[in-house]
Image (spheres, rainbow, N blue to C red):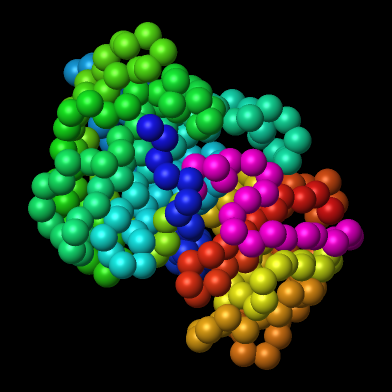
């Protein structure tokens, strides 16, 4: 069963800002030739060994929908569901909204608690491993968890760390795979992400983008608390963004570069966008709903 598609990536931009400011642009890799997936002090990482022979490692701040490489973790606002994903894009859709569906090496873990997520051992509610496949094919071409466990060794207000192991089976041919020596250490944000969000637009808030290198961004449903723009090829690095310290107060119809009353600019490396480059604008509300759209000025 593919992970739930009804969750939302709450406070995405706050996490993206933190990742951009704290971690910068980090790389990650996978394969038996990479003995240590850690990149720099405090870098998010997730690693494991497949069938006792191949070490796979992902590192660096992740974004959703996924693009490039990274590790991302999200917890629901109640603190009872935790999602962790590590990914590396292997092919497809390298630079814009058009093109083939991207393929990934990918590991996804989800655990839940009747109370609050804490430092103990869990049986994962969802566990999926994909190797060079589109996320939409996880049900048939990915390996779903059959047995295993996730042990959280550290849970703070900002980061999650732990270990995991298990086995999985591929539905298409019943092939089995084993995972051992899994470990992760990653900051997390609030609000769950959706596996339906792998296209050029998605989320709960519908967005439209105007023309030109200083476009206007419009969205449905009222004000938001954060607006951010990244390049599609570098989804964790904001080129322009604003947030509010309190509730949703940024109105629709915002022009790129505009900072309305009550908002603070958190990134401004591209106050004017570059023609022909693919960008992604994301808006978020305090309650956790969000929306994004990719565009080329």
Answer above or below: position of 148 versus 244.
above
Q: Where's residue 43, x and y in %? A: 35, 52
Main SS, magenta region, reads loop
Return the residue found at the far bottom: 261
Nearest the viewer among 286 and 271 is: 286
Nearest the viewer among 173 and 238 is: 173
- In the rendered structure, which segment of residues is drawn in magenta? 194-213
Q: Where's residue 294, x and y in %? A: 71, 50
Q: Is residue 296 left or right of residue 232?
A: right
Answer above or below: position of 51 versus 116.
above
Q: Is residue 10 left or right of residue 292?
A: left
Could you tell me if residue 168 is visible in this image? Answer: yes
Answer above or below: position of 9 versus 109.
below
Return the residue found at the far right: 212
| Residue name at image x 20 percent, y 64 percent | 116
| Residue name at image x 63 percent, y 69 percent | 227
| Residue name at image x 15 percent, y 46 percent | 122
| Residue name at image x 83 percent, y 46 percent | 276
Where is the N terminus found, in terms of image quarters?
top left
């Amino acid at each position: 069963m593919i992970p739930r598609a009804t969750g939302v990536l709450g406070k995405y931009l706050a996490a993206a800002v933190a990742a951009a400011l704290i971690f910068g642009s980090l790389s990650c890799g996978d394969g038996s030739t990479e003995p240590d997936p850690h990149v720099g002090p405090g870098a998010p990482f997730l690693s494991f060994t497949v069938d006792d022979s191949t070490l796979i490692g992902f590192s660096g701040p992740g974004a959703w929908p996924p693009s490039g490489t990274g590790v991302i973790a999200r917890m629901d606002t109640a603190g009872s569901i935790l999602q962790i994903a590590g990914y590396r894009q292997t092919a497809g859709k390298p630079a814009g909204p058009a093109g083939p569906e991207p393929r990934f090496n990918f590991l996804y873990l989800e655990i839940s608690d009747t109370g609050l997520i804490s430092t103990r051992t869990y049986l994962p509610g969802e566990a999926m491993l994909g190797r060079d496949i589109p996320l939409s094919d996880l049900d048939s071409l990915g390996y779903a968890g059959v047995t295993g466990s996730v042990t959280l060794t550290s849970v703070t207000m900002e980061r999650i760390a732990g270990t995991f192991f298990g086995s999985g089976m591929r539905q298409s041919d019943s092939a089995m795979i084993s995972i051992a020596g899994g470990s992760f250490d990653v900051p997390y944000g609030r609000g769950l992400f959706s596996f339906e969000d792998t296209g050029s637009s998605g989320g709960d808030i519908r967005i439209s983008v105007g023309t030109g290198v200083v476009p206007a961004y419009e969205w449905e449903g009222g004000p938001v608390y954060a607006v951010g723009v990244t390049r599609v090829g570098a989804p964790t690095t904001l080129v322009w963004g604003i947030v509010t310290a309190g509730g949703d107060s940024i109105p629709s119809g915002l022009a790129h570069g505009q900072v309305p009353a009550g908002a603070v600019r958190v990134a401004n490396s591209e106050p004017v966008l570059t023609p022909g480059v693919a960008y992604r604008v994301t808006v978020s509300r305090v309650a956790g709903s969000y929306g994004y759209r990719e565009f080329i000025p």
